[in-house]
Amino acid sequence: MIAQLERFATKFVFSKLTVAYFQKALATLVAKSVKPTGNDFLFLVNTRLWNEVNTVLDRWLIEHKTDGAVLYSKAANGYVELGATYHSYEFAGNKVIFKVERSFDVEFPTRNYGVMVDLTADGISNKPAMEMLTFKGGQFIHNWIVGVGGKSGLDSGEVSSRVAGSHIVAWGYAGLAMYNPYRSVIFMGEESGVPLF
């Protein structure tokens, strides 16, 4: 997905994330959309950016003094739960929904990274914005390493391992096609040099 989007996506590189970046990204995606309002965009983020998104939205709520506190609720035994986890952000009639993508942690361990994509199907052909592809019959493959006792644990005969038990390997082929990479925005924070994990 990243390789298909990098060349065509609008890119935002930042040292400090702000809500204004969300608004600019939404405006960029809306400019490439069929309708000016009512769009839902997906924002896939690594763990580093996910933490920063929540911090930024916490600060935004405090600055706008929606209720004098961030968010709180009365929990059991007289304790108070403080804080929130943000599912989405809406601006000018369009919404961006956040989702953590852990594979971005592997690819970008020392920087905040996220991809905002428009998942609206093509208006003419009705083709989806992205599609998963595989070889025919290759989406799910099983192989066994038969140990002592065979597959059932009680079989006699030829074995592949001296271990008293069998091992199954489940795997498959999958790929992703992005049909309209122009309708995407990439967020990249500055390199920190320190991996999160």
Image (cartoon, rainbow, N blue to C red):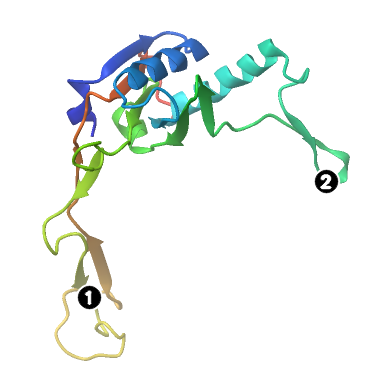
Tell me if mark 1 has few (under 14), some (14-19) or many (20+) residues whose alpha carbon lies within 10 angstroms of its own: few
Name the quadrant of the N terminus: top left
Note whether residue 181 is visible: yes
Q: How far apart are marks 1 and 2 (CA)?
A: 54 Å
Q: Please, what secondary structure does the residue beneath circle 2 have?
A: helix
In the image, is 180 to the left or to the right of 79?
left
In the image, is 53 to the left or to the right of 173?
right
Looking at the rendering, which quadrant does residue 131 occupy? top left
Looking at the rendering, which quadrant does residue 42 occupy? top left
In the image, is 109 to the left or to the right of 85?
left
Q: Position of residue 169 (x, y in %)?
A: 24, 65
Circle nearer the viewer, 1 or 2: 2
> Residue farthest to the right?
78
In the image, is 4 to the left or to the right of 185?
left
Q: Which amino acid does label 1 sit on?
A: Arg
Residue 76 is labelled as 2
Q: Position of residue 164 (x, y in %)?
A: 30, 78
Q: Position of residue 58 (x, y in %)?
A: 63, 20
What residue is rendered at 26% in x and 69% in y?
168
Residue 162 is labelled as 1
Q: Position of residue 92 (x, y in %)?
A: 50, 19
What residue is rendered at 20% in x and 59% in y?
139
Q: Are marks 1 and 2 in contact (CB under 8 Å)?
A: no
Q: Please, what secondary structure does the residue beneath circle 1 have?
A: loop
Q: Which amino acid does label 2 sit on?
A: Ala
Tell me if mark 2 has few (under 14), some (14-19) or many (20+) residues whose alpha carbon lies within 10 angstroms of its own: few
Name the quadrant of the C terminus: top left
